[in-house]
Image: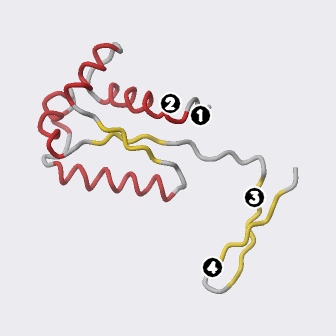
Amino acid sequence: MPSFPRLCPTGGAKVVIMSDSNEKPLRAVGVYWLEEADYPAAQQIFEDGNTLPRSWKEWLKIAQEMEQGLKAYGHPVMRVRIEPVAFAAWCAENGTTPGRQGRRMFVAAAVKDRYGDQN
């Protein structure tokens, strides 16, 4: 299959990047997101809540850095808000617990709902 060149400006010089037409776009990635008002309840509801940073501001800094890193690699990033009470109910309905595994499943379900099966 033919490749199509793209011109990328780099400080006055032009670099030609060959784009393979078989390249797939990077998968969308979900990150769980907490509102400041929900943080104390999340710490109580999450099984692993004692491993979260002490404050929402500390958590937010880490979450934003992770989000920026994923975006820097070119991933579409979807913030998935977790409202603690609704999340705990979702976990019970889906046979998981409100800890790390439950968050992974919840975020994955939200990403699949928005982006479809990315396999």
Nearest to N terminus: mark 4 or mark 2: 4
Percent position (x, y) of residue 29? 47, 42
In the image, which is nearer the foreground, mark 4 or mark 2? 2
Give the residue type at disc 2.
Lys
Give the residue type at disc 4.
Thr
Q: Is residue 3 above or below residue 9?
A: above
Percent position (x, y) of residue 56? 17, 48
Nearest to N terminus: mark 1 or mark 4: 4
Residue in front for this viewpoint, 103 or 76: 76
Nearest to N terminus: mark 2 or mark 1: 2
Task: Estimate how packed mark 1 is, as few (under 14), some (14 to 19) or many (20 or more) residues with alpha carbons within 10 Å.
Answer: few
Q: Residue furthest right?
A: 1
In the image, which is nearer the foreground, mark 3 or mark 2? 2
Give the residue type at disc 3.
Ser
Query: From mark 3 to mark 4, how far is it between C-alphas?
Result: 17 Å
Left or right, 12 with respect to 100, comes to right
**Given contact means CB atoms under 8 Å apart, are the residues at marks 2 and 1 in contact?**
yes
Which image quadrant for residue 16?
bottom right
Which image quadrant for residue 117?
top right
Task: Estimate how packed mark 2 is, as few (under 14), some (14 to 19) or many (20 or more) residues with alpha carbons within 10 Å.
Answer: some
Percent position (x, y) of residue 7? 72, 72
The numbered mark at residue 19 is 3
Q: Is residue 66 above or below residue 86?
A: below
Query: From mark 2 to mark 1, how far is it between C-alphas?
Result: 8 Å
Give the residue type at disc 1.
Gln
Q: Which residue is mark 4?
A: 10
Q: Is residue 9 above or below residue 42?
A: below
**Given contact means CB atoms under 8 Å apart, are the residues at marks 3 and 2 in contact?**
no
Query: From mark 3 to mark 2, how far is it between C-alphas?
Result: 27 Å
Q: Which residue is mark 1?
A: 118
